[in-house]
Amino acid sequence: MIQFISHYTDHYSYLDSIRMALEGGCRWVQLRMKEASREEIVRTGHEVRRLCDAYGATFIIDDHVELVREIRADGVHLGQKDMPVGQARDILGDKVLIGGTANTIEEVCRHYHQTADYVGCGPFRFTTTKKGLAPVLGLEGYRDIVTKMAEQGISIPLIAIGGITAADIPDIMQTGMSGIAVSGAVLKASSPVDEMKRLMDIMKTVENENRQ
């Protein structure tokens, strides 16, 4: 699984970034607009919903539990300083996807017990697209978390995030992670659509190999 997290550059808007990810084959996108006004997020969110409907993709909004129903998002992703997963579940109910960010096994456990559907686990390495980074985990950090989850009988999809490139996918997936999230690797490419296609092809090959 590959999730795409929106960002902007001098050349592309938040909406452009999601459109290109979808054109490249990604079917799970997160609208993340940290510096934007509510009105801008709502306006962009309605456009993202239309795009995701056209491509049959899952649409997650970052942070804004109160906007999930208004923009008809499929779910919400909550950072470490956002509303607790359990509180969001009480508000949104069982049919809405809820993800949480984690950097430690303790945080993974907390999200699991609060009924998160998945956990974004990172950062894998330093990334310039997010401020206030938690300690970098790397491959060893992922292996440690996956091992401790198994010891505690906890099973929840873990999505690796943070500065991930195409070359990292095979090694990350060998640690037991369920997928990756990307942003800069796509938008910094000379052709973001082609780079998304390349990432999807690599992920498909790795997943097929791991099933054999």
Image: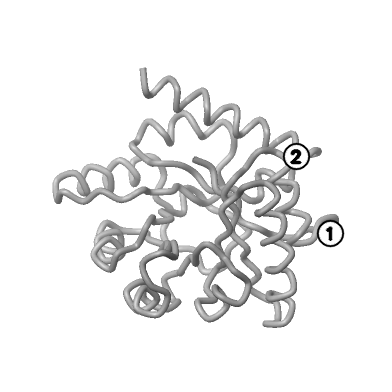
Query: Which of the 4 image quarters holds residue 80?
Result: bottom left
Cβ–Cβ under 8 Å for marks 2 and 1:
no
Please tell me whether mark 1 sits on a helix, a strand or a loop.
Answer: loop
Seen from the viewer's position, the closer of residues 42 and 53 is 53
Residue neighbourhood size for the residue with mark 1, other residues' Cα within 10 Å, grouped as few (<14), some (14–19), many (≥20): few
Q: Position of residue 11 (x, y in %)?
A: 85, 55
Seen from the viewer's position, the closer of residues 147 and 13 is 13
Q: Which quarter of the figure is the C terminus placed in? A: top left
Q: Which mark is residue 163?
A: none
Question: Sequence order check: which comes first, mark 2 or mark 1?
Answer: 1
Quick check: 9 above or below 63? above
Query: Which of the 4 image quarters holds residue 140?
Result: top left
Task: Tell me what residue is drawn at x 49 percent, y 50 percent.
Answer: 161
Tell me the distance, in whole angstroms, between the alpha carbons under discs 2 and 1.
17 Å
Task: Tell me what residue is drawn at x 42 percent, y 20 percent.
Answer: 209
Q: How is the image coloured?
A: one colour
Task: Tell me what residue is drawn at x 47 percent, y 29 percent.
Answer: 170
128 sits left or right of 162 in the view? right
Task: Tell me what residue is drawn at x 38 percent, y 72 percent.
Answer: 93
Q: Position of residue 133 (x, y in %)?
A: 49, 63
Q: Position of residue 72 (x, y in %)?
A: 59, 69
Q: Position of residue 130 (x, y in %)?
A: 58, 63
Quick check: 143 above or below 128? above
Seen from the viewer's position, the closer of residues 170 and 57 is 57
Q: Amino acid at mark 1?
A: Asp
Q: Amino acid at mark 2?
A: Val
Residue neighbourhood size for the residue with mark 2, other residues' Cα within 10 Å, grouped as few (<14), some (14–19), many (≥20): many
Quick check: 58 above or below 95? above
Q: Which mark is residue 193?
A: 2
Q: Which mark is residue 10?
A: 1
- Foreground: disc 2 or disc 1: 2
